[in-house]
Amino acid sequence: MKYDFDTVVSRYSTGSVKYDSQEANDMPGDVLPMWVADMDFPAPEEIREKMKSLCDFGIYGYTMITDEYFEAVKGWMSDRFNWQVRRQWLVTTPGIVFALATAVKAFTQPGDGVLIQQPVYYPFTNVIKDNDRVVVNSGLRYEDNRYVIDFDDLERRLADDKVKLMIICSPHNPVGRVWTKDELEKIGKLCIRYNVKMVSDEIHSDFVYGDHRHVPLATVSEDIRENCVVCTAPSKTFNLAGLQVSNIFIPNREMRHAFKNEMNKTGLMGVNMMGLCACEAAYQWGGPWLDQLKIYLQDNIKFLKDYIKTKMPLIKVTETEGTYLVWMDLRALNLGHEGKVDQKTFIVNNAKLWLDSGTIFGKGGEGFERINVACPRAVLKEALARLEKAYIDMIGN
């Protein structure tokens, strides 16, 4: 491989949320962080060189979206997803969570219902509750080590007059599903039938494996395109989360106007120029790096699955179709019962790992843990060895 994903780069004492916030999160200092969804790999050299040239220029004034920037974004969406985006659709924001909160305020009123599919990325719940809207959950069903949509339940909940917006996670975090075009079309048709607008968080769209294919929601049909907001970003793909830039596509003019009007109320006057610089470089030159990274991540996922199946068979690993986040089912360990320690104690104190507990992802997450495998193989091996030791200490050989 041309690119090095094996070298371990220490991120301690760099102000990293992932590595330096143990005390703030009530975690012991000796846990191995495998939680928040950023990677332990340096961004591609081409991005870093482009940012260095901007630093050397020395003037960091107000920055607008250039033709070159849009062409880079447009080319990426076309090449990777066969999606022909238009410039007037594009709204840049400091992040997708910001965009989700803006959409909630733009398309609903206090007291309205916003539908999500738990277990799901927990900021979905936060931006709904924090803006005085009501969380409506149409929970995913866990069947044969894989999650599916309960369309009967989804329709019943969408039919409630208080539901005005649905937030879709595509690919789904944390359960790793990559929704098919047929599934997205069923969701879209139901939302149109019940006059419910859609926002699709597609931040993990570049991490899809095997025969699975990411389908941007706006490409499913013209009717669905005119009823949705699609949220994208280079941050997960190229490890740029701290640069705070996302590309939000809103084809419908009225929806775009409402979204931008709500965003203007925040006083936001633009996004980070370094973020724009990095995004443009990533989409121009980052493809080969990403293609090799995906091979490495697939091998990490396979290594984890094989290791757990062989050495910790009571733990089940959900099929990971997309993302670099693996969803593990610990329910067969019966933690917290029959004199056993609870799940948090088992993971944090016994295994000395910092994972994301399934409970934070809402109903249906109880008994699960999310682990981030976007790290050098040596780090993943250390994490699994720690988990295995705690497992053996608890149940024996």
Image (tube, rainbow, N blue to C red):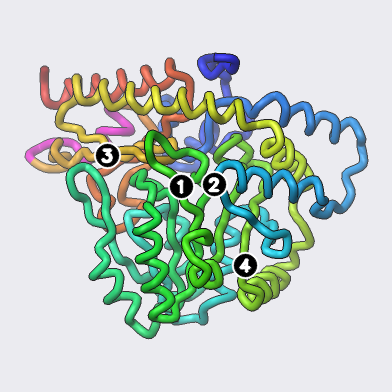
Would residue 157 be found to the left or right of residue 324 on screen? left
Tell me the residue at 74%/47% (across/down).
71
90, 353: nearer the viewer: 90
Q: Nearer the viewer, mark 2 or mark 4?
A: 2
- How far apart marks 2 and 3 lie (CA) works out to 25 Å
Provide the residue designation for mark 1.
214
Q: Is residue 167 visible?
A: yes
Q: Magenta includes 193? A: no
x and y, in percent, of residue 11 in the image: 58, 25
Provide the residue designation for mark 2.
81
Q: What stretch is highlighted in magenta?
A: 338-350
Residue type pointed to by label 4: Pro
Residue type pointed to by label 2: Phe
Residue type pointed to by label 3: Thr
Tell me the residue at 27%/50% (across/down).
147
**Decide: marks 4, 3 in contact (CB < 8 A)?**
no
Q: Which of marks 1 and 3 is in front?
A: 1
N-terminal-most mark, 4 or 3: 4
x and y, in percent, of residue 57 in the image: 92, 34
Q: Is residue 93 above or below residue 176?
A: below
N-terminal-most mark, 1 or 3: 1
Indicate which disc residue 318 carries. Answer: 3
Q: Residues within 10 Å of mark 4 (few under 14, many from 20)?
A: many
Residue type pointed to by label 1: His
- How far apart marks 4 and 3 lie (CA) works out to 35 Å
Q: Nearer the viewer, mark 2 or mark 3?
A: 2
N-terminal-most mark, 2 or 4: 2
